[in-house]
Amino acid sequence: MPTHLIVLAAGQGSRMLSDLPKVLHRLGGAPLFVHALNAGAALEPDRRVLVVGHGGDLVRRAAAYDPEIAVAEQSEQLGTAHAVLCAREALADAVGDVFVLYGDTPFVTGETLERMAAARATHDVVVLGFQAADPGRYGRLVMAGDTLERIVEFKDATDEERSITLCNSGVVCADASVLFDMLDAVGNDNAAGEYYLTDIVGIARARGLNATAVTCDEAETLGINTRAELARAEALFQARMRAEALDNGVTMTAPDTVFFSHDTMIGRDAVIEANVIFGPGVTIESEAQIRSFSHLEGCHVGARAVVGPFARLRIGAELSNDVKVGNFVEIKNAMLGDGAKVNHLSYVGDADIGDHANLGAGTVTCNYDGVFKHRTVIGAHAFIGSNTMLVAPVTVGAHAMTASGSVITQEVPEGALGIGRARQMLIPEFATRMFEKLKKLKANGQKADG
């Protein structure tokens, strides 16, 4: 049976005290709504709809990373039922189940959604609930055995209903046609004057349909409404990612100082030293070593490669197996072949570095002319002398060399030596005479002229 997702991302999030829509605040390097979509991916949905409202254009642009995501707009904030109805056009003629998720609730897992899908096989409506340590102002799930009778919002609950600790997460699953048919019957005769999605349970029961609740750990239902809650969520996210990495055979010498993104991938027997930050889009292969104080984003590190300490790998950095990138080296949009070395104090951008090439300290690929980027190509087994400036576009052939301190502006053919520097001159005794003159001026309270 096909499955479809609706992710509600229309809230203003005024408690965030931000001009940015709440769902665009980042957790693990990704906007909050992306986490809901990632969880829903476990269901292999046919269609995904993101319902936007406040700052909708910004959210729409952020969602453009995946052109298959449909975006629906909720122009007025009239409640969750109204928000789901805004997705009706995008799901016109859809057959199968619809899951409603929330863009500001990032921790619901794919496993939990799969359990809801299993429960849908025997129930018309499935709601995700949790036992709350402090039920507070959550909506309450009123159960009779495994039957969900109704959901009561805190504002409308009696004292007896408020004593219930089984609470509503807001996540719902139902057949598409049944869901939208019930939503048409939802009214706003309640304390808030809003159209509650939760009312569909009572409507379903009145129509002779059955409903149930699947429960999950309360931590999965954590919603984010303030900066403080976002900070706590980030701490929880990082703790989970660190534990997962350790369980998967990654060595971390100081786990609490390593920070992951939502999509960080690290192979078995990799070693991550202290104070390493992974931005989005990083893959580390097995047995690689990421040394302390390195920052990586949008890059791939091959097996047995060593990066750092104090290295920066930027978007497009592709390190093959056994590569060494040392301290204070920055790599951007560059491919380094097997066994290549850039050990210290270098910038390699927009370049192709051949197998086992060795770039000396202070090597810089001068890739930008102020308007366009240009590419540098260094062949296999080439040796680039320290403090070489490679003015792109330029090629250094395989087994070629550059002399230290050179500015290379033309091709260096295979096996050749490229030298591009001024000829050294010697003026005997000049330094002695100059320093004697300067010292006399200083003693007389004067300054050197020019």
Image (spheres, helix red, strand yellow):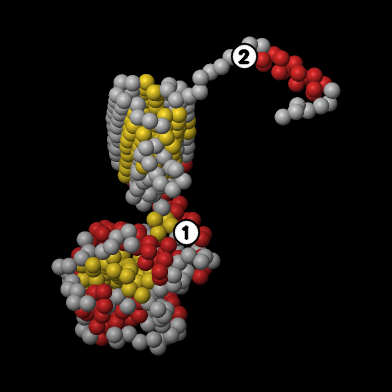
Determine the secondary structure under disc 2: loop
- The residue at which mark 2 appears reads as 427
Residue visible at 24% across and 83% down in the picture: 181
Q: Is residue 65 visible?
A: yes
Residue nearest the observer in this picture, 385 or 334: 385
* Residue at the spot of label 1: 230
Q: Amino acid at mark 2?
A: Ile
Q: Residue furthest right?
A: 444
Assign the C terminus to one quadrant of the image.
top right
Q: Is residue 253 left or right of residue 150?
A: right
Question: Is residue 255 or residue 73 the one in the foreground?
Answer: 73
Is residue 112 in view? no
Whole-percent x, y for residue 83 in the image: 35, 77
- State how many labels appear: 2
| Label 1 or label 2, whichever comes before in sequence order | 1
Q: In which image quadrant can residue 265 be found?
A: top left
Residue 290 percent across, percent down from the top left: 39, 35
The residue at the point 40 percent across, 73 percent down is 53
Q: Residue at x 30, y 75 (%)?
A: 87
Residue 324 x %, y %: 37, 29
Q: Amino acid at mark 1?
A: Leu
Nearer the camera: disc 1 or disc 2 = 2
